[in-house]
Amino acid sequence: MSVPLQALPQPAAREALHTRRYDFRGYRREDGMFDIEGRMVDTKDYAFPNDWRGMVEPGQPVHDMLIRLTLDNHFVVQDIAVVTSASPFEMCGDITPAFGALKGATVAKGWSHALRTHFTGAHGCTHHVEMLRAMGTVAFQTIYGWREKAKREAGGTQSEGPPAETVPGKRPAFLDTCHALASDSEVVKAHWPQFYQPTIGGKVAD
């Protein structure tokens, strides 16, 4: 079924000042690993002086940050590459080796907490941490999507639907992580009826 595109309401008259672009992509490698890549680029619509770079012209990156996370099939970080291609301060890129500490970490529940714990404040880079937080959900979409694709190609399922639980019979960790996957939603009722919990009077029924 075709759904018409929706748009924001018409804005008031305004002046363009800042653009932030995110680009996240997931890849299946020949060796069975997964690469999750991210890039964040900030640009201004006006020129401004910078102590290190001189005059930064409109459209030139203020920030240009890149990350590649290499994960195995169990979401464990096998490798990470972090690059600061453009920044407002010369020393910004000096912190990128610190992110090597993520090797061996698992992209799962608690991922955002681990990032805050290890790379908060002066121990990290705000922009790279923001990207890594978002890349957790990109990894989810990439790896679970690939598993469903493999099942379809093997004849195990016919359509693209919500991901199957990691361990059959075990409550999937992604339940209650968003409105559609709430324990009392029709999506959960249809796909994971054993974990469906209807609400009565605004409370989850026992």
Image: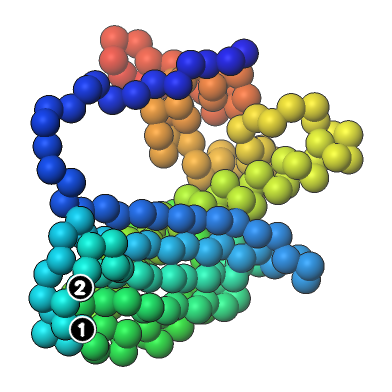
Q: Nearer the viewer, residue 76 or 195?
A: 76
Residue picked out by circle 2: 56
Asked if 154 appears above or below 187 in the picture, the reply is: below
For the question of whether residue 60 can be seen, the reply is: yes
Q: Residue furthest top?
A: 201
Q: Quadrant of the C terminus?
A: top left
Task: Give x and y (percent) for residue 177.
Answer: 41, 39
Residue at the spot 65% in from the left edge and 59% down from the top edge: 27
Q: Would you say 20 lies left or right of 132 here?
A: left
The count of marks equals 2
Location of residue 61 (image quadrant): bottom left
Q: Residue at x 42, y 79 (%)?
A: 83
Which residue type does callout 2 highlight? Val
Mark 1: secondary structure? loop
Residue 42 horizontal/vertical position (percent) = 28, 62
On residue 53, the disc is 1
Q: Give me the C-alpha separation between circle 1 and circle 2.
A: 7 Å
Marks 1/2 in contact by CB < 8 Å: the verdict is: yes
